[in-house]
Image (cartoon, grey):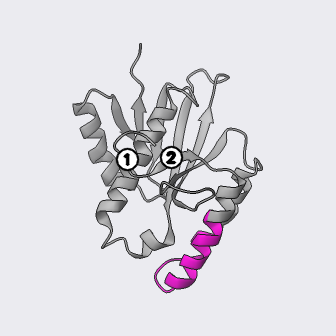
Amino acid sequence: MSEGFIFEFKQIDDNDARATVAAWREQVEKFGDIVNPSYYRMIFDWVLKTASNGGDPGSYAYGLFKPGGQPSEAQALLAITHAGEKSDAPWLKLLSLYVSPEYDAESETRVVELGQITVQAIIESFELTFDKHPSDSLKICSAGSTLDRGFLRGLSAQLNDRGIRARMSGNWLICERPKG
């Protein structure tokens, strides 16, 4: 867990994936009239496949977890892809940020927690470019994700004000890692 954050961030393994899917299925049943069950079935298929290394090469599932025992269900899932050393300009992409059905259903009353999840997901993804998945840039997609284009455009301005080169390109926020 990075300093100042309330969630643990880690790559999803098989046990985490199964625990998350089981917990999220119960939440879909509870909030099925508010959330889209077919959307979550797609997420379940993706995380189980990716966690068992059955996904595309360079594709990873990461999660934000409440601190505590193992395995536990993720509060949010991050779909990450990495073009590594074989690429002319290695990049890391945050393709999607999926929040649990509970957060989805209660999004209007849990705005602060959703903000914490979003900020931590972006910062943790950016930190992956320095060590686990060395990359020149982090690209964050707004299409089909909790992260919308307007939010990312505003974030781009904030990042530039703090010395991180960030720009929008279509549905992508591109954050370039500082040189040196």
Residue 159 higher or lower than 45, as above or below: above
Residue lying furthest left in this view? 161
Q: Which residues are magenta?
A: 20-42
Residue placed at 57% from the left, 62% from the top? 73
Residue lying furthest bottom in this view? 33
Left or right relative to 146: residue 61:
right
Left or right relative to 85: residue 171:
left
Q: Which residue is mark 2?
A: 9
Within 10 Å of disc 2 (Cα), the crowding (few <14, some 14-19, many 20+) is many
Q: What kind of residue is marked 1?
A: Phe
Distance (Cα) linking label 2 and label 1:
9 Å
Specify the quadrant that holds the C terminus. Answer: top left
Q: What kind of residue is marked 2?
A: Phe
Membership of 4 in magenta stretch: no
Residue placed at 61% from the left, 75% from the top? 25
Residue 145 higher or lower than 134, as above or below: below
